[in-house]
Amino acid sequence: MHSVKQPGLLPAISPATGKKLADIKETPLHQVSESYSRARRASSKWSDISITARLTYLKKLKSVMVDEMDSIARTISDDTGKPLTEAIVADIMPTLDSIDHIIKHSEKDLRRQKISTPVLLFGKKSFIEYMPRGVVLVISPWNYPFQLAMVPIISALAAGNSVILKPSEVTPLVGKCIEELFAQAEFPQNTVQVAHGGKEVGAAFTKGKPDYIFFTGSVRTGKIIQEQAARDLIPTTLELGGKDPMIVFADANLERAAKGAVWGAFTNSGQVCMSAERLYVERSVYPEFLQRLKEEVGILRQGTGEEADIGSMTFPAQREIVRGQLEEAIQNGAVLETGTSPAEWGDDMFLPLTIVTNVTQDMKIIQEETFGPLLPVVPFDSEDEAVSMANGTVFGLNASVWSRDMEKARRVASQLVSGAVVINDVIISVANHGLPFGGAKESGIGRYHGSGGLRMFCHEKAIVEDTG
Ligand code: ADP
């Protein structure tokens, strides 16, 4: 059972079994200022070495990760309740892809760029230089606790910054594992420090005046961090929630779309910011599509072993959010097409994969991020109606549009207010094609991944030269 937290220790609880796995020592708040002093000293040494030398360390990190793949995957699975395969495919692989992308492109992306000089400035030459910002504070969440901590860390490091990571207290074993990986890869001391603890530790490090804050988590916490950062004029990237719509037109490949919807909605037990959280289906194929969805859901196996497709919820409070949203929807007339009434869930962390119909746009299940295995399905009659419903929340992270008519699909994609839109597929990994990742509206501020994501961890400096 979930044990009580002892002072100074963070309990790591397996959500799948309820057993305590370990206690991780919390970072005492009085250490914040000393951590920043160490990080500043490390950052000045790290930024002095060449990008090529920095990449040598990242190559070593990659080889340690490959050697330790099984044990990292086991730690992620134990800490989150996701199956081992999912830990490898969705947490470790995207991190390796990102390291590869950085190794391949960062020397070019961070090189001094020559800009064509206007004739008026005849004789002068113009350049842009990319200077490291200094100390980057990365605050990371629990749903993809490895990838969402590692990618900003390695990007910030490649750009010449030192890093302090504050991983989620919900998955403290992964935080510890990251700390050990950097030690094993023999990074210079204090180039990466890990501060273990809950929101008090996060808040204390946010107030410690880093040079940049990279936050991934809830909208609520993102706003608190932005407020604090504003007081010290600290720039931030905020990667927040999503309520990702998926639109299926009648002329789509319905077989693929149904598989995509079920995968998008239920992978990682729905605890994904780039998922399918709402499904809009053209009315003429609605009954047929619903039937296909139910069949696809029936195939999925829940558990944490190698055979499993879908794991458990990662912590009880999240299960209660999902339960609350579904109860509200049912009270207002929603109908369960699969799954069981939330009253029957009890304390089980493996929630039924639930498809819900007869839902309206004003319900929480449509307006608020669910982060659980619930998929509301809504019919639509016209392209305009689909776009307006899809855009009708405060979020704008990811969306997907399904149609064989590419002109229509592109027209709809361009009208969606969203950081990303995928046509005829659902979740995308942006790690290996250099695309920007980030949200519109309350889904966040800023983009990472790709050249822009690397340069975001730098000051851009304009240099104009006259030979005199
Ligand atoms: P969730 O509620 O979904 O766990 P949060 O946004 O609360 O998401 O948490 C994401 C990360 O932000 C975690 O590492 C958490 O400890 C940290 N955090 C929470 N509150 C604060 C805060 N006030 N200041 C800094 N970090 C915080």
Image: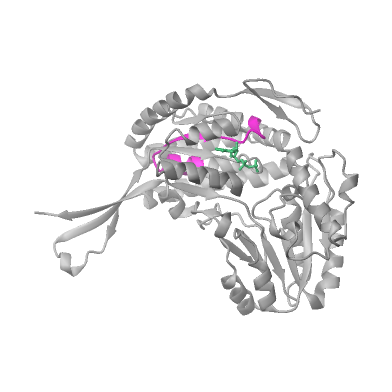
Vertical side of 161 occupied by 392: above or below: below
Q: Tell me if 298 is positioned left or right of 433 in this view.
A: right
Give how far across and how far down residue 361 sits, in percent. 73, 65
Ligand 1 location (quadrant)? top right
Q: Nearer the viewer, residue 270 or 51?
A: 270
Give how far across and how far down residue 206 sits, in percent. 49, 36
Vertical side of 274 occupied by 413: above or below: below
Query: Magenta part of the protein: which range?
Result: 152-173
The N terminus sits in image quarter: top right
In this rendering, does residue 370 appear at all? yes
Q: Tell me if 396 is positioned left or right of 324 in this view.
A: left
In this rendering, does residue 189 appear at all? no
Q: Tell me if 336 is positioned left or right of 204 in this view.
A: right
Does the stretch in magenta take in 158?
yes
Dividing the picture into quadrants, the one containing residue 251 is: bottom right
Q: Nearer the viewer, residue 320 or 155?
A: 320
Dividing the picture into quadrants, the one containing residue 294 is: bottom right
Q: Tell me if 449 is positioned left or right of 6 in this view.
A: left
Vertical side of 398 occupied by 146: above or below: above
Give how far across and how far down residue 253 sits, in percent. 74, 72
Q: Nearer the viewer, residue 310 or 366?
A: 366
Give how far across and how far down residue 127 sits, in percent. 26, 55
Does the stretch in magenta take in 160?
yes
